[in-house]
Amino acid sequence: MEERVTLVVGASPEPTRYSHLATLRLNAHGYPVQLFGKRVGTIAGEPIHRTLPTGLAVHTITLYIAPAHQADLMDDL
């Protein structure tokens, strides 16, 4: 069975951001994540992708972006 992942949209390498904290907690509980954000970096060793990953069996999407920027992504999600 293909692993289903949580896609973290708006991931940030900044440790005080909620997306960063959520990723750490997801990892701590054994949930696989894919990270998408506008800044290059990593969280807990996972790379932050600057383009939306394709071909994933996504189980959950978490959004950590301002409403003004969400409309640009909705068709791709």
Image (cartoon, rainbow, N blue to C red):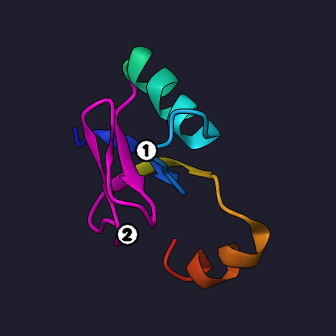
| Residue 9 vs residue 32, the one in the foreground | 9
The secondary element bearing badge 1 is classed as loop
In the image, residue 45 above or below residue 51: above
Q: Image point 76% across, 77% down: which residue?
A: 68
Label 1, residues with CA under 10 Å away: few <14, some 14-19, many ≥20:
some
Question: Is residue 41 rendered magenta in the image?
Answer: yes
Q: Which of disc 2 and disc 1 is earlier in sequence? A: 1
Q: In the rendered structure, which amino acid carries the disc numbered 1? A: Pro
Residue 59 placement (x, y as % from top left) = 47, 46
Q: Percent x, y for residue 47?
A: 27, 48
The percent coordinates of residue 6 (x first, y second) are 45, 43
Image coords of residue 2 (percent x, y): 23, 43
- Distance from Cα at disc 1 to Cα at disc 2: 17 Å
Question: Which residue matches tag 1?
Answer: 13
- The residue that mark 2 highlights is 52
In front of the other: 24 or 4: 24
Foreground tag (1 vs 2)? 1
Within the image, what quadrant is residue 22 found in? top right
Relative to 18, residue 74 above or below: below
Residue at the spot x=55%, y=29% of the render?
21
Quarter of the image that includes the N terminus: top left
Compared across the picture, whether 35 is left or right of 55 comes to right
Label 2 residue SS: loop
Q: Which residues are magenta?
A: 31-57
Query: For residue 36, which numbered disc appears in the image?
Result: none
